[in-house]
Amino acid sequence: MKDLVFSLIDKEKVRQSEGLELIPSENYVSKEVLEAMGSVLTNKYSEGYPSFEGIPGWSEDKIATEILPNYRYYGGQDNVDRIERLAIDRACRLFHADHANVQPHSGAQANNAVYFAWLEPGDTVLGMSLPAGGHLTHGAPVTQSAHTYHFVGYGVTDDGNIDYDDLEAKALEHEPKLILVGYSAFMKIPDFARVAKIRDKVVEKSGHEVLLVADMAHVAGLIAAGVHPNPLNFGFDVMTTTTHKTLRGPRGGLILSKGNVASPLKKPEKNLANIPILIDRAVFPGTQGGPLEHVIAAKAVAFGEALKPEFKTYAENIIKNAKALAEALQKDGFILQGGGTDNHLILIDVQKSFGFDGKLYEKALDKVGLTLNANSLPHDKGAAFRPSGVRLGTPAITTRGLGVEEMRQLSHWMKLVADICKKAGSEETLSDYKAELSQIHTEVKTLAQNFPVPTI
Ligand code: DSN
């Protein structure tokens, strides 16, 4: 008999195909990405790295056939080496980087490796604070990195933008060794050039080098497609990202940088020229063991897809849909943080719009097959588990082919559910509105079935 797990996977397939995924950090991978991830590469150990030599300017055929010395701790690496080299080469081409480390198991691992590569315990990092829209790994007190390094947080302005004056004042006051631009709940386009100038001022004042890092996990696909500025083109040294959000690859992490690996075998000094090798050593053996080569293969396939012209159209449509959805929501009475969106993500102030919290709204939307997440807003007075807002976005539904017209329909359903929550007032009493919720759920399912998930 098949393991019980498979019946649950089948149920998840039904959930995914009958509902609409609005969590802005989720997506649906292609059949090819899924196939690479579920391949025999999962059987292989490959601690270390494929060649540091060669590659720039090589054809993919040459990368896939040429034998180069590797820096692995196990035999049997011929195929794995070439797959990892393809992933590295494609990542560099996608993001105009000189160097890519494709081994981080996740975005958190990628960020932690960069910290470990550059910082000493107690060093100061300046990043966007979690309540302002930053990420846990940018210094939230509950994280391991916050116990190791000294994080200072900058905030956002009332109109939802980065508070650059706050960032500059804190940078000059605290003279951080690392400045971080990145977020998981932010809907504007960062002014990378302005942050690069602030870094220069800190270097001048402090006399020490400052690493400029962009955590672009949410918008990596938009950057790859050229519809969002690339921090590496504006003086940033390092960009970290996950590979599964707008980039539409497998769950995993990636670190990109300018500069080339010098000697992989000598212990490098911590300076900006050595960043690529410092990062490689910080990922393995610094913070990780064996790389997940089946996931790296799936990353390579996803990067190959993102290099195709169709991916640019996809990324443009993500933004077009997000703007259309934001406009429809505002017409339907929703109050949006930042007054709209410039990327793939929308933050709704549910409390201000309708007088109830984001968690109740998330739970009610779950009942009609619309999945998003409750999210804190800047200066939120609600508890972490009962924040005032919800966060949603368009990467996944755009993959399924929904367009501007469907965005208006989505907003209409969301308003109907908001009206039900207002009447119900709590999760317990939502059951009094079962019939109305079930009618909306049927309509959502009908629409969802017209836009199938690529792998189901
Ligand atoms: N959990 C991710 C998100 O949803 O934004 C960030 O790591």
Image (cartoon, helix red, strand yellow):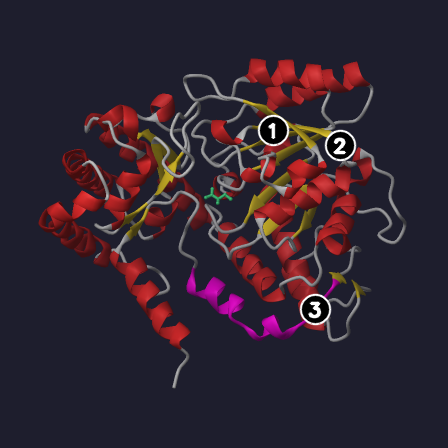
Report the disc number at residue 127.
1
Q: Position of residue 440 (x, y in %)?
A: 15, 48
Q: Position of residue 68 (x, y in %)?
A: 79, 64
Q: Left or right of 327: which side holds 295? A: right
**Residue pointed to by mark 2:** 122
| Residue 67 painted magenta | no
Type of the residue with mark 1: Gly
Q: Position of residue 274 (x, y in %)?
A: 81, 40
Q: Does residue 346 lie above or below 10 as drawn?
A: above
Q: Earlier in the sequence, mark 2 or mark 1?
A: 2
Q: Position of residue 155 (x, y in %)?
A: 52, 22
Q: Foreground mark, 2 or 1?
A: 2
Q: CA distance from mark 1 to mark 3?
A: 42 Å
| Magenta-drawn segment | 30-47
- Magenta stretch, main secondary structure class: helix
Report the disc number at residue 65.
3
Report the disc number at residue 350.
none
Q: Earlier in the sequence, mark 2 or mark 3?
A: 3
For the residue with label 2, is its CB less than 8 Å from the closest atom of ligand 1? no
Secondary element type, mark 3: helix
